[in-house]
Each structure stands twice: as structure tokens, then as C-alpha cells.
Image (cartoon, grey):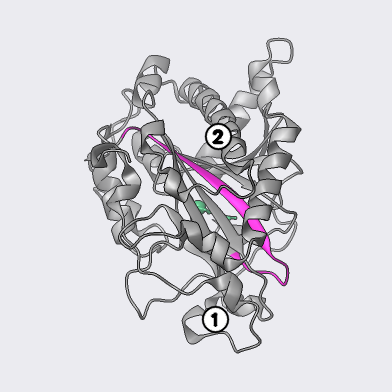
Amino acid sequence: MGSKSTNPLELGRSLPVPNVQELAQSDDQIPERYYRPEADVDPVASIDEDELPVIDLMKLLNPELIDKDELFRLGSACREWGFFQLINHGIPEEVIEKTKDDIKKFFKLPLKEKEAIKQIPGHIQGYGQVFVHSEEQKLDWADVLILNIQPSQNRDMRFWPTNPTTFRDTLDTYTLKIGKVVDCLYGLMAEDLGVDLQDMLNIFRDQIQSVRINYYPPCKQANKVLGLSPHSDGIALTVLLQANDVHALQIKKNDKWLLVKPKPSALIINIGDMMEIMTNGKYKSIEHRAIINIEERLSIATFHLPSIDVLLRPFPGLVNSNGELYKTISAKEYTREYFAGKLNGKNALESMKLRK
Ligand code: OGA
Ligand code: NI
């Protein structure tokens, strides 16, 4: 077990809730706590109103293909969208496919087997749910598996599936490769922002990485429930992979929900709250949510944040005459505040703003 001082997932608590995959198999009415009328009422952007920017990592890294405009596109995606899809990211197709497969196999296991790694009261890691603080609170139509990945002493193997037998190796390989892509992105972001590369690398030297594997069961009344409540991610950078071809991630754009339909094998990258603070608001951490379909959906989100003792404050050179826009806070304190709230839009980040 990792020591408490380096493990952000030890800063949160969540109440136990029913298993949604089981619930979805019963013919009963949706329980009141899952009923979310807003899922169907909030304004949604029309299907082809906009498409998430596509960034080609090869054009940014391969000296023979280098395309200067691509860096500009990366920068504007981070400033204006807070989200983009990354193609030609260099992660072998076999690694991606194996990851998707092993995740699907785990969630297909009988409940009893999955529950062998269920969350222990007072802990966030394991199979269960997070951000539940009261018996009255509305609930998300999903089960999750949360695991610490880096630093490796934070791994708690009690919660790592052993079935399928390749699961642990697969997750290890996948997250290692994702971490490398993320390191490349930090470098490119430093270049775009005009931040000294060394300053950026110093902040992320002892980077923390964790995963949240989301299982969204089908629902007969899919438009009456929500898979994941609106939120922004309380970390620096997220990489999301959809494990099957059901589209349900929506991002808030111009006050409407826009459905994200990633290209096959693209990774979805998004800016988190900590990066918004460290760029003094230049890069945006955008609210997003997941809806439910009549088919099941699976995804894996890999979260990255600086070591929790790092103070979150703007990189040198990013404070103009407007001054700093956010309070300076340690990554540890921010994580504590984030987990203390129920997942609710951009509340945690808003509370850090110096001027409202
Ligand atoms: C998350 C997240 C979206 C999805 O896990 O933080 O936003 O589509 N997931 O599963
Ligand atoms: Ni998210």
C-alpha cells in the first residue's frame, strides 16, 4: 500500500451503492435515485454542428512529417475546446485491442467474481462507485473500477482483477504507453504556451497516474438516466478510450451538449482543472457527461496529475496584466476538495477563482 502522502485516491470517500449492471437486468422500474429528467431536457447540439478537433501526433513528432500548423491546431484545441482526438499516437493497435478486450471480459464476469475486488468502505480504489455522499443524492447509471497506476508503490494489487488472466499485464502496458504519449503532449503544450520546457517537465516529473474504467449498462429508458454526471476532471490531463463503438460522451459547447464521435482508434484527450489553473486559464477544463444508450458502453479514462505536494500555480510567463486568476493550492488540497463534492459541473474549479 502506498503511503497516504503520495496517494490522491486515499483523499476521497464514497458511500456504497447498488450494482447497476445487476439492476439493469431486472424488469422493474428505474429506481427513483437514478431518474434524471435533465438527461432528456438539456439542449443538445445538432449532430453535425461541430466536430471535435483531430490532432495528428505524427505530424508533431516525426521530423520528416513535421507540420507547423499542427502545433497551432493543438494549441487552439486546448484553448477553445479543452478536448481533442489524437490520431497516429503510436500506441500499437494490438495494445489498444487487448485493453478493450480485457476490460469487456472483466465486466462480463458474474457479479460474485467482480465483487472479489469491490471497494472497501472508506476507499476509492476497486470496483464500485465514487462521489456518493448522501442517501438522497441522484446516482449515475454505471459501475466503475478505479485503480492507482503510478507511482507504482501506490498500486494496491488487492483491487487488480486476475480474471482475465492477462488483465494486469494488459493494463500495465496500456498505461505505460499512455503515460509516454502524455509526456509528449506536455512538451508540445509547453512549446505552444511559450513555457520553458524544463518548468513543465519539473512539474510532471513524479507524475501520478490512475484509471477509472467505466461500465455503462444498457437501459430500457435510456433517456431517463445519466451514465456520468456533468463534471470537469479534477486532474491535469485525461486520456479516454472507448472500448466499444457506442457514442455517449457529451461535452458542453456554447451551452449545448455536443456528442463526441471519435474516429476509430483515436484517443480522446482533455484538459483538466489543474492544467487550467497552471495555464492561468489559457487552456480550458470543459464540463462533460456521459449519456446512456439501449446498448452497453465501456470506456477507460487515464488521469494524470503532478505529485500531490506540487503547488498549483501559473507557469512563469503566463500571468499578464490581469494577474493570477486562481488561488494557489497544492495538488493534494485540490484533490481533497474535488472528492469532497458530489460530481457537480465545474464547482471545484469555480471555487478556486479569485474573481468571480
Ligand atoms: C471520466 C469521463 C467519459 C466517458 O471518466 O471522467 O468523463 O465517456 N468519462 O466514459
Ligand atoms: Ni471526465
Element type at mark 1: loop
Q: Is residue 13 left or right of residue 286?
A: left
Residue 354 lies, in percent from the top left, at 24, 48
Q: Is mark 2 within 8 Å of ligand 1?
A: no
Q: Is residue 99 magenta?
A: no
Task: Point out residue 74 in the picture as x, y percentages from the top left corner.
Answer: 59, 31
The vertical placement of 320 against 112, above or below, is above
Q: Residues within 10 Å of mark 1 (few under 14, many from 20)?
A: few
The residue under label 2 is: 172
On screen, residue 329 versus residue 184, left or right, reads left
Closer to the camera in the image, 283 or 297: 297
The amino acid pointed to by label 2 is Asp
Q: Is residue 166 left or right of residue 228?
A: right
Residue 300, percent from left and from top: 58, 48
Gap between marks 2 and 1 measured at Cα: 39 Å
Instruction: Report the magenta residues as a range.
Output: 291-307
Q: Which residue is mark 1?
A: 37
In-front residue for pair 126/344: 126
Q: Is residue 352 visible?
A: no
In the displayed structure, would residue 202 be above or below residue 160? Answer: above
Camera-side mark, 2 or 1: 2
Query: In what quadrant of the picture does the C terminus appear?
Result: bottom left
Within 8 Å: ligand 1 and the Cβ of disc 1? no
Q: Amino acid at mark 1?
A: Pro
Q: Would you place residue 8 above or below residue 222 in this image? A: above
Q: Earlier in the sequence, mark 2 or mark 1?
A: 1
Q: Could you tell me which secondary element the residue under label 2 belongs to?
A: helix
Is residue 21 at all visible to an observer of this figure?
yes
> Counting other residues with Cα less than 10 Å from the Cα at mark 2, is it few (<14), some (14-19), or many (20 or more)?
some
**Picture coordinates of residue 27 (x, y %)?**
66, 87
The quadrant of the picture occupied by the N terminus is top left
Would you say residue 304 sits in the magenta stretch? yes
